[in-house]
Amino acid sequence: MTSDLLTDTAAGLAARMAAREVSAREVVDAHLDRIEATDGDGTSDTDVHAFLTVVADTARRHADDVDQRRVTGRDLGPLAGVPLALKDLFTMRGAPTTVGSRILEGWVPPYDATVTEKLRAADVIVLGKTNMDEFAMGSSTENSAYGPTRNPWDLGRVPGGSSGGSAAAVAALQAPLSLGTDTGGSIRQPAALCGLVGSKPTYGAVSRYGMVAFASSLDQAGPFARSVTDAALLQSVIQGHDPRDSTSIDPVRVGRDLPDLLADLDAGVEGLTIGVVTELQGEGYEPGVLAAFEDSLRRFEALGATVVEASIPHASYGLPAYYLVAPSEASSNLARFDGVRYGLRVDAPTAEEMNAATRGAGFGPEVRRRIMIGTHALSSGYYDAFYNQASRVRRLIANDFATAFEQVDVLVSPTSPSVAFPLGDKTDDPLAMYLNDVATVPASLAGVPAVSVPNGRGAEGLPTGLQVMGPLLGDDRCFRVARALEADLGLDPVPSGANAVAPA
Amino acid sequence: MRRPSRRRVSEMALSEAEVRHVARLARLDLSDDDVAELAPQLSQILEYAEQVGEVAADDVEPMVHPFPVTNVMRDDHPAASLPRDEVLSQAPDAREDRFAVPRIVAEDA
């Protein structure tokens, strides 16, 4: 019974709760027990360490409340009573928000993120806050100040990042759903490495209010799940215009509604044209990743899609442009961590010395590197050659996408050039770590939606992912194509292998 | 995937003195060891990023946002703000309903 609650989908659990076959309290207790059994505190090499904070009491109270309201016949939402793990970058009253950093250690935010409010309104039950690369800067979750998270498929490997805790929680059956954020691939890459579905919505589809900012023109919240339908259900809950985020898409101003992610989800790919991005494959991608990708293309053809070559001519400039734009915005956003209003303070005789001492002690190595790159790129004499030039390249990439979508319905590529790599493999080489994002940053720079869906097994039997990219506000199309591949493949999302997390 | 050789020295390389200058701009205390480690790392990253100069002439309009956005103003109605005591309770130092900081102006100024 318990293991069956852990392996079921969010949609399946919601249906069983609605039919009163199981209570929300039973579902929540089963997942809290699973966290207790598998998560640890990160000190053992068998600890998944997906969570930084577990809010067990709050979660149980919320579950009891859902159960009571269900008894009285109240109309509850489609995910009511389903547990979720929340990246420790969204503010939530009553629990610390650390962003994986020492500089915010102990901070209990006095307000809820819009996403947190929407989850509560939908009666999705938050189990806790998940580990992440500090300030979402990284691709392995090894940059967390609170120790790394381990990949449930192989506890000696990274889960990807920066939303590695959220990915690992869902893969380890600690929660059927989680939320992450994606600035350059921080949902899609860990989804691929943990055998999950992960979605980066169209920029502006989900409110950024209450998300600790990294790169404001790129940051976007999105779901992890073990099925495409679950991911689409969760994204439907969190998307929508928010007056508190001035970059949130206002359907009135844009003249278009946000997409209905569920209406055509099972419509298949027959008649669709799928463009294979020439520039996002080949050299630098592992053979197992490329073999799974080729297999997916054959499946799309067999399912009735037309598969054609497509080009994003400036794709290879995406990574260098991203590693100027994102640090520039970060250096500006992170100026607020000055030891005055929240978090850490290191005392010094003057305010300015206190600012510098606090920031020097509170930020880890990767955050310092990015603040330094960004400050340099925005400084007098370098602004045009670095920041402005990167923003010009960003325009070229966005234009490339717009041109491609005149010919094709979606674009596809491998999500990540490799399967999950061993802990410690890339920590001494910042640039090698950045190359993990090579396939995901182009869509981030253009602002277009992209979904990663499991598409097979690569080296060592580890999961691989396929990225489906759509035009602006074409999130529904990404999910539809991902769903068709998922249905055709029928992969088991539960981790297997000699060094995998213990079975439920 | 392109990746520069570690041996190539670019004109975009940062000296240790330049690293200290940028750290001052960023209000970031760095130890001598930090500076020695950061100078080659930052140089390598900037050398890689320098590729953006190979394309996109000046006539390409820089893109700062995926959607063409204009400033959004809210209606000018009073609304509740965050509870002051709760906000101040999270500050490292607060006195007399204010955030407290060390001396800002030099004594001999």
Image: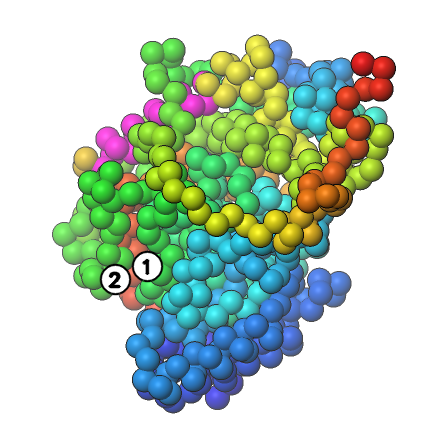
Instruction: Point out which mark residue A236 bears.
Output: 1
Vertical placement of residue A490 versus A462, above or below = below
Residue at x 71% of width, y 62% of height? A42
Secondary structure type for disc 2: loop
Residue type at mark 2? Leu
* Closer-to-camera residue (A253/A132): A253
Secondary structure type for disc 1: helix
Chain letter for mark 2: A
Instruction: Point out which mark residue A262 bears.
Output: 2
* Span shown in magenta: A389-405
* Closer-to-camera residue (A71/A173): A71
Chain letter for mark 1: A
Residue A54: image location, x then y, percent: 62, 68
Residue A342's quadrant in the figure?
Answer: top right
Asked if the residue under mark 2 is in contact with the one under mark 1, i.e. CB atoms within 8 Å, the reply is yes
Calculate the distance from the C-alpha at mark 1 to the C-alpha at mark 2. Answer: 8 Å
Residue A431's quadrant in the figure?
Answer: top right
Q: Earlier in the sequence, mark 1 or mark 2?
A: 1
